Image: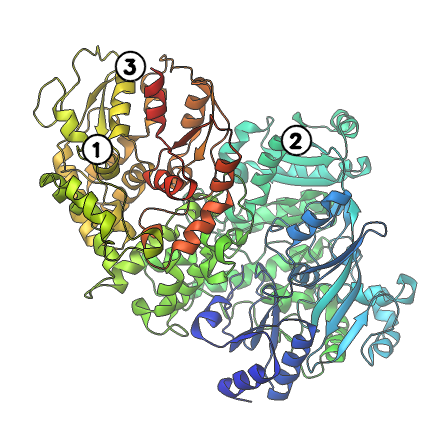
Amino acid sequence: MTSPGELERTLRENLRGEIDFGAAARALTTMDASNYRRVPVGVVAPRDADDVAAALTVCAEAGVPVLPRGGGTSIAGQATGVGVVLDLTRHMNRLVSVDPVARTAVVQPGLVLDRLRDAVRPYGLTFGPDPSTHSRCTLGGMIGNNACGAHSVAWGTTADNVTELAVTTYGGTSHRIGTGWAGAPDGLRELITGHLGPLRTDMPPGFSRRISGYGGLDALLPEHGVQVARAFCGSEGTLGVVTEAVVRLVETPRAPVLAVLGYADESAAAEAAAGLLPHGPLTVEGMAQDLVGDTAARLPRGGAWLFVEMPDAGAARTLLRAADAVDRALVTDPAQQRALWRIREDAAGTATRMPDGSMAWPGWEDCAVPPARLGAYLREFRALLAAHGLRGSPYGHFGEGCVHVRIDFDLVSAPGIARFRTFSEELADLVVAHGGSLSGEHGDGQARAELLPKMYGPELIRLFGAYKDVWDPAGGMNPGTLVRPARLDENLRFAVLPATPFAGEIARCVGVAKCRTTDPGGASVMCPSYRATGEERHSTRGRARLLHEMLAGEIVTDGWRSTEVAEALDLCLACKGCRSDCPVGVDMATYKAEFLHHHWAGRIRPLSHYTLGGLPEWLRLIARLRAAGTVNALARRVPVPGLDRERGGRLPEVAREPFTRWWARQPGPAQGAKEVKGVSGSGGAVTLWPDTFTQYLNPAAGRAATQVLNAAGLSVRVPTAGRVCCGLTYVSTGRLDRARTVLRRTLDTLGEPAGPVVVLEPSCAAALRADLPALLPDDPRAARLARAVRTFAETLEEYAPAWRPPHLDRKVVGQTHCHQHAVLGDGPDRRLRERAGLTGELSGGCCGLAGNFGFEPGHHQVSVACAEEQLLPALRAAPPDALVQADGFSCRTQIAQLGGARARHLAELLAEGL
């Protein structure tokens, strides 16, 4: 076999696309969304079909396997490989053409499904199959897995919606296949003609979700029209590379309505699902209480539910009358429908977390049985789980008998892996006994291919091997998948990780890749750096994969000193968006801090870590010397070392009078904390936290908050000036030992908080609520302070519920702080704005400054790109008299510097109206 270096050189000589055999590129493609990991030799991003042919020719001559890869969201391991990975998302991602009359589109394999749907929406059309990963899965990946999604009861699988495929095989030969034998590889017609009997009699009874193996081979029977393209779908990259596809489009219902039906339990819901199909539903999705959790309060009564989408209100009412449900609801508002569907779409991640916080894993994610058998199957499936001491929360496409589930397998210890194998074998027997398919839409990959003989029998398995050999005689396309497969308990991704808490956190990323969406998504924050760059290494998943490989030490070999990981994390804004938006709660900001802590241990850090990371100390010193005027004047002339020159190389101006100095001048006792005189305190006392930004950079917010809290009947106390700090700047620069020292000093100074602790700066509130107890887990004072922390709006809602704010009657625009979105929530803020007559929505996403991020060298371009997603367009579109609100100091600074507007804290807006 050719050496990797020689192969890389030959590929560079013959292709126009990018070739990357470096550690980072390989590390990013070792895993998909499954339990498996295989290490490729390199990654190629072909420019076009000619590049694909060249790559397949070079690799065939070198004897190196090839794996075509789309969004990398495959759940069974089929998007992992040991040879050359073809990344078809970087360049081959175009919508070539749309024919709205014929209702077809020509697409390249790397096109993301939502981009196709967005493009054809103006014609009233859509692509029928819609997996829950529609915002990041690609058409090529959907063809490879024969993906389905929630609407398959109406519009079928991907194979039902593909008419032609352009395919290039290992060695570089191109084929154009559709219906009939034209374009098919030599020997295929003869193979099928010689096996008509087994194809007619040995195939399991056909039902819509028979996706496993080469289950579409019977589409090549003459009575089925010799549908070569249809048979190719679901081949999981084992036959060739799709370079172009002609797909069918369907008409989008004008006003779909969601009927939500409540049932006593999961079995009752499953048994009812098949009976709803004659009503012509677009979807019949099922889930039970153990998956829905607290969101059950938004649903009709019951212990399990069916989400049934109907084409119009009339059809939905007819269905509701006919359904034998415990309770029911009709949802016509599109926004409410989207909110409910998000419960279902995020299930692939939320089902990964058990109620006790432990993790569950894919592997038996999408078995399917005929819908009429679903109720009985689920009862036996639950019994099998219990017999093995396993837990899982089934949900999925009940109208098609397809069940998704994540199971709390132990995939690390030898006994746990043995139990995984035994359970898998017994579950395969159960599925087959019910006439089902081991895979109902996600493909078999490595998770189930070994067990396909249970479903198909020896003769069909031999036919599958012969079919593979006709297309791929050298066996170079994705070997080890479907035909002559690897064992289901080999190549597990957890085996390479050390047994440490940090490794357990990194393994939490299951790869569903919600972070790879390119749409801001309204209030969603994750992942701003990926949307700015479009590069996998700058997604939450990409960074998690690099950290995984850093801990494994096979590809990324320099551990915590890794430059590959450092470069990927450099553009992480530490926005914490992934903490809430990632379905499994990956917290990359915390991982970044841990990495920086180790990466720079015992070394001189970047200058910005001292200037920005040590900001509280510098500002405290400036205040003590009463040097704000001098520092501001000097900063206007001389750039601050370690700061980005494109942003002017300077920090915002330092206030001449810190907040606590102003506070000390107010009437009242002066023993470290004081109450404002003249206030009844009928609402009780609150502690107003003098965070660094309010204290030294924007004291006006503190003064305004004091005025509003007093007006609401609350007496205000302020801790000793300069002695309390949330440690945020030290955490964000990875100076965790210093952060712990600062936080212990803070706890010593503060003592036991009497009542709520009001923190005006969202990032500081989030640090106290989340980072403080994590950094000092053995100090009970840390947990008590974290529980006491309240935002400004939370305080007024909880401790002054009868107070009526001034009615401002103004339009408001601005920015919801990303840490507030991720950690604190903004429900009280929305309600307070509404009571104050502030109309409109604040921008979601991230402002792009993100504390120290936007000030650091090399970050300006990404910082601006993040602001241009939602914030700056909203400011430009706002009416001239609109108020601009941003509770985060970073957000206010970004708005001033890039938007030319003055933003204020909500407390300031309310104080002006008093």
Badge count:
3
Contact? badges 2 and 1 (CB < 8 Å) = no
- Residue 690, disc: 1
Cα separation, mark 2 vs mark 3, equals 45 Å
Mark 2 closeness class: few <14, some 14–19, many ≥20 residues within 10 Å:
many
- Looking at the picture, which amino acid does disc 1 mark? Pro
- Looking at the picture, which amino acid does disc 3 mark? Ala
- SS at circle 1: loop
Give the mark, 2 or 1, whose residue is nearer the N terminus.
2
Give the mark, 2 or 3, whose residue is nearer the N terminus.
2
Mark 3 closeness class: few <14, some 14–19, many ≥20 residues within 10 Å:
some
Where's the N terminus, which quadrant?
bottom right
- Residue 711, disc: 3
- Residue at the location (48% across, 36% down)? 875
- Residue 668, disc: none
- SS at circle 2: strand
Cα separation, mark 3 vs mark 1, equals 19 Å
